[in-house]
Amino acid sequence: MKKVFFASLFAVGLAACGGGSGNAAKTAILDSCLEEADADAETCNCMADQFVENLDPKLLDLIVEASKAEDEDAYMMSKMGELEPAEMTQFMTVMMGAATECGMDM
């Protein structure tokens, strides 16, 4: 399940554009974590905080928009090519750092 969560979070995080404040992004990440991961609320909250604190606002916006999509994975695939390599790198770096910081096994 953790792999499904990280795949979903990766999809959500890379998937969209516009519309996400820190609170909206935190809620989207927290909801995804609680639904998809074998993690408790404390761990999911930690992950969401790490993302909000460390991701560029554009990537936080992506998370919010992707969470609204009917099919997050398909939406991600349609938007993934629009990201710069540095944006993808930042997302992956923050995701891995958050997993380590929050004690979530990958």
Image (cartoon, grey):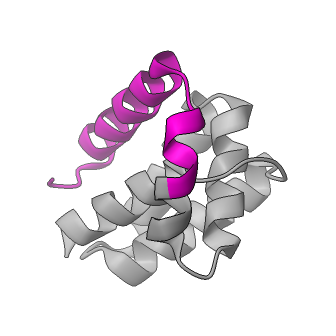
Residue farthest along the left direction in this orientation:
105
Q: Position of residue 63 (x, y in %)?
A: 62, 54
**Residue displayed at 69% across by 59% down:** 64
17 or 46, which is in the foreground? 17
Location of the N terminus by quadrant is bottom left
Write down the quadrant of residue 58 in the picture.
top right
Q: Is residue 34 above or below residue 79?
A: below
Residue 71 in the image: above or below residue 9: below
The residue furthest top is: 86
Tell whether 89 sits left or right of 32. left
**Residue at 65 percent of width and 52 percent of height:** 16
Give the x, y percent position of residue 70: 61, 82
Query: What's the magenta region?
Result: 78-106
Figure check: 69 above or below 93: below
The secondary structure making up most of the magenta span is helix
* Lateral position of residue 47 relative to residue 100, left or right: right
Q: Going by the image, does 61 lie left or right of 43? A: right
Nearest the camera: 32 or 39?
32
Q: Is residue 84 magenta?
A: yes
Instruction: Please report the residue visible at 36 percent of the width from the left and 27 percent of the height from the top.
Output: 93
